[in-house]
């Protein structure tokens, strides 16, 4: 395993694992009990706010909603549904009320904090989000007598604050899907949310873990496809598995971390080079890959995922995936720096070659920098020389 990879896993990952499991004990004895470890709570929010505070647009449709509560007396929370113990729910309600009263809460954008509750793990991570039930489509701007849509605050509890923060965007999307599924009829909310909200942990937190267990050593192919932006086609799969795989690829890619134009060009270059997508056939007991690639970098990180699978901590998988992307970006930036030096220094060109040879992902990094430096003649010559070196190395 690369030293840099080991350092990554010995840092943030151990801190996350300690915070999730409360420290102490062997990995085998810290596997969490899934159903008791995750809870939800849904509150109806009651308060009076101006149209500007509600975020209503001039057309009468709700836009980004901002809730400001100068004091606790400006609003109230009433319980709609929860799977928390009856003696614990008031503690959560009090904690969330204090949080909401301290500042602004934006509709559809969740916050993550830690709360002290009378649970086996007394201090747990809590994601909470304000959302507004959409107005019926038949409403128009002239129906001013129609009351404002009801507002709710949903809370998800499980793991630690750091662990839940890794999944905040996924949980925001989960809340948005809840809004989409609500039909606006009176009494329908309670009927449609019980199973949906109680399934938040399996739906938002566990997909990465499920993918790791499904692919095992073949995870290296999936990591390589995500890192190189190679198109992936999933065949003969149920919708849940396909959703898990596509979600893993989305999280594992470098989209948003390097220039979007580079990503687009890289995807086009990979498609032209391979002439076909990586195909994953899930018809048998084990997924089968066609046209897949791998390298030493992805193999090392695959092993890190498999090692983490022994501990049963679903939050740790996301942290490893974030570290995987961070290391790829660091290597990319280092290669760019070496290339700039090599434009005027032949020894630096040799340093570029050594770096590509030893980093484990030279095949992908070289494609990334080639796309970015397409219009720069000096760098282009350096990259052509590096490609020749790498071809000779492969033949040798």
Image: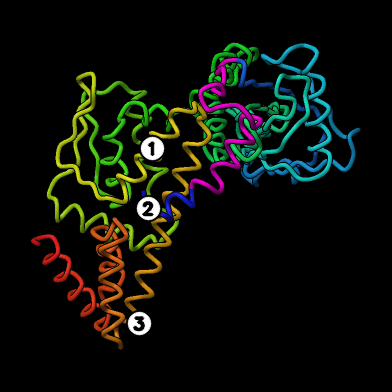
Write down the residue under mark 2: 2
Q: Helix or strand or loop: what does disc 1 sit on?
A: helix
Q: Which residues are magenta?
A: 9-35
State the residue in front, 7 or 305: 7
Q: Earlier in the sequence, mark 2 or mark 1?
A: 2
Write down the residue under mark 1: 248
- Residue 23 relative to residue 216: left or right: right
What is the x, y in percent for residue 118? 78, 20
Write down the residue under mark 3: 341
Q: Which mark is residue 109?
A: none
Q: Write the residue at 40% across / 67% down.
A: 333
- Against 124, residue 29 (above or below) is above
Q: Write the residue at 20% across / 46% down.
A: 293
For disc 1, the neighbor class at 10 Å (few under 14, some 14 to 19, many from 20) is many
Figure quadrant of the C terminus: bottom left
State the residue in front, 186 or 189: 189
- Against 303, residue 335 (above or below) is below
State the residue in front, 150 or 164: 164
Q: CA distance from mark 2 to mark 3?
A: 25 Å
Q: CA distance from mark 3 to mark 1?
A: 36 Å
Specify whether residue 32 is painted magenta. yes
What is the x, y in percent for residue 236? 21, 23
Verify CB contact (< 8 Å) between mark 2 and mark 3: no
Q: Write the residue at 67% across / 32% down.
A: 125
Q: CA distance from mark 2 to mark 1?
A: 23 Å
Q: Write the residue at 65% across / 47% down.
A: 58
For disc 2, the neighbor class at 10 Å (few under 14, some 14 to 19, many from 20) is some
Q: Is residue 320 visible?
A: yes
Q: Earlier in the sequence, mark 2 or mark 3?
A: 2
Verify CB contact (< 8 Å) between mark 3 and mark 1: no
Q: Main secondary structure of the magenta part?
A: helix
């Amino acid at each position: 395993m690369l030293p840099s990879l080991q350092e990554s896993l010995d840092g943030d990952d151990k801190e996350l694992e300690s915070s999730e499991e409360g420290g102490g004990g062997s990995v085998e004895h810290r596997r969490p009990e899934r159903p008791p470890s995750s809870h939800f709570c849904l509150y109806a929010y009651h308060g009076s706010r101006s149209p500007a505070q509600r975020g209503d647009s001039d057309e009468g449709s709700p836009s980004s909603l901002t809730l400001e509560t100068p004091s606790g007396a400006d609003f109230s929370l009433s319980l709609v549904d929860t799977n928390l113990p009856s003696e614990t729910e008031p503690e959560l309600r009090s904690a969330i009320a204090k949080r909401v009263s301290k500042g602004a809460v934006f509709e559809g954008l969740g916050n993550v904090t830690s709360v002290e509750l009378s649970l086996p793990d007394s201090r747990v991570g809590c994601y909470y989000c304000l959302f507004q039930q959409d107005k019926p489509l038949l409403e128009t701007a002239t129906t001013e007598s129609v009351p404002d849509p009801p507002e709710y605050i949903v809370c998800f509890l499980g793991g630690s604050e750091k662990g839940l923060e890794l999944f905040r965007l996924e949980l925001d999307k989960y809340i948005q899907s809840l809004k989409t599924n609500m039909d606006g009829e009176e009494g329908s909310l309670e009927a449609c949310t019980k199973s949906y909200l109680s399934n938040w942990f399996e739906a938002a937190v566990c997909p990465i873990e499920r993918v790791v267990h499904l692919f095992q050593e073949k995870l290296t192919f999936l990591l390589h496809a995500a890192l190189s932006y190679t198109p992936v086609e999933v065949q003969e799969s149920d919708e849940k598995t396909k959703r898990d795989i596509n979600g893993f690829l989305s999280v594992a890619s470098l989209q948003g971390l390097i220039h979007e134009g580079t990503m687009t060009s890289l995807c086009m270059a990979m498609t032209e080079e391979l002439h076909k997508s990586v195909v994953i056939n899930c018809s048998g007991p084990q997924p089968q890959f066609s046209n897949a690639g791998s390298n030493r970098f992805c193999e090392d990180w695959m092993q890190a995922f498999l090692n983490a699978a022994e501990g049963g901590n679903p939050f740790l998988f996301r942290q490893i995936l974030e570290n995987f992307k961070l290391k790829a970006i660091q290597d990319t930036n280092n290669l760019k720096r070496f290339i700039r030096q090599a434009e005027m220094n032949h020894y630096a060109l040799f340093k570029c070659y050594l770096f590509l040879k030893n980093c484990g992902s030279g095949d992908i990094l070289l494609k990334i920098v080639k796309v970015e430096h397409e219009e720069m003649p000096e760098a282009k010559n350096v990259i052509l020389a590096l490609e020749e070196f790498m071809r000779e190395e492969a033949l040798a």
